Image: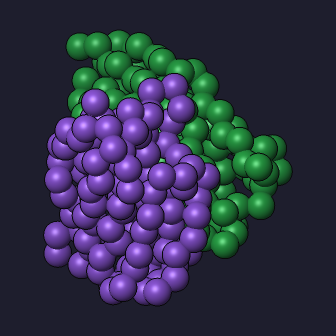
Amino acid sequence: NAGVTQTPKFQVLKTGQSMTLQCAQDMNHEYMSWYRQDPGMGLRLIHYSVGAGITDQGEVPNGYNVSRSTTEDFPLRLLSAAPSQTSVYFCASSYDRARGYTFGSGTRLTVV
Amino acid sequence: KQEVTQIPAALSVPEGENLVLNCSFTDSAIYNLQWFRQDPGKGLTSLLLIQSSQREQTSGRLNASLDKSSGRSTLYIAASQPGDSATYLCALRNNAGNMLTFGGGTRLMVKP
């Protein structure tokens, strides 16, 4: 039982490049989310999913896309990276509304 | 929109002290509340989960309380230790279950 696995742990991108942050969980959790953490702004929700095939926008969705083709995987795509997307990204998952969220260890992204 | 405030933002105490961290929120329509610990450069570790119908939860030296009517939660740490040094975050889950709203955190340092 690996929990929530995020890859890569670190990434440097050039402005305009695209990339996908991977998130996988092996706990059969229905709810999955992506957050970004920035100094002075705290953790903010980017996108979320309540089950395979269902995704929706959070508080700060611009510049990001998600898909949920399986229960286990919830990748986050940066379409055209901008310096404002420099942040630490966390993926989280939860079995249902009553259970708590489990967080991954994060991806530290720098856009230059 | 839910707003979550954690006071104090930083706290330094000598080892052995009992301490209370505060979390206040503006919207009492929550499903549950989760307290997390975050060590520098690391992910979030769940400490305690309180359902909206509960008043408190305990785990070892930690006790969390919830008062929805006043929009407050507290995390009590008994007999603090240097290993408790970390940032503590409270997060409120909305009734739809698809979103956590985080406070800004309390950075705790316990001095030997």
Q: Position of residue B34 (x, y in %)?
A: 51, 54
Check the image and tell me how it is coloured.
by chain
Q: Quadrant of the N terminus of chain A?
A: bottom left
Q: Residue at x 40, y 14 (%)?
A: B13
Q: Quadrant of residue A97?
A: bottom right
Chain B: drawing colour = green
Q: Position of residue B23 (x, y in %)?
A: 62, 37
A70 lies above or below B48: below
Q: Residue at x 43, y 86 (%)?
A: A52
Side of A94 relative to B96 (left or right): left
Q: Position of residue A38 (x, y in %)?
A: 44, 33
| Front residue of this view, candidates B15 and A6 | A6
A102 lies above or below B4: below
Q: Quadrant of residue A11?
A: top left
Residue B59 visible here: no
| Front residue of this view, candidates A33 and B81 | A33
Q: Position of residue B39 (x, y in %)?
A: 28, 35
For the image, the number of numbered tags is 0
**Chain ID for purple:** A
Residue projecting furthest to the right: B69
Q: Quadrant of the C terminus of chain A?
A: top left
Residue B3 visible here: yes
Q: Residue at x 35, y 72 (%)?
A: A74
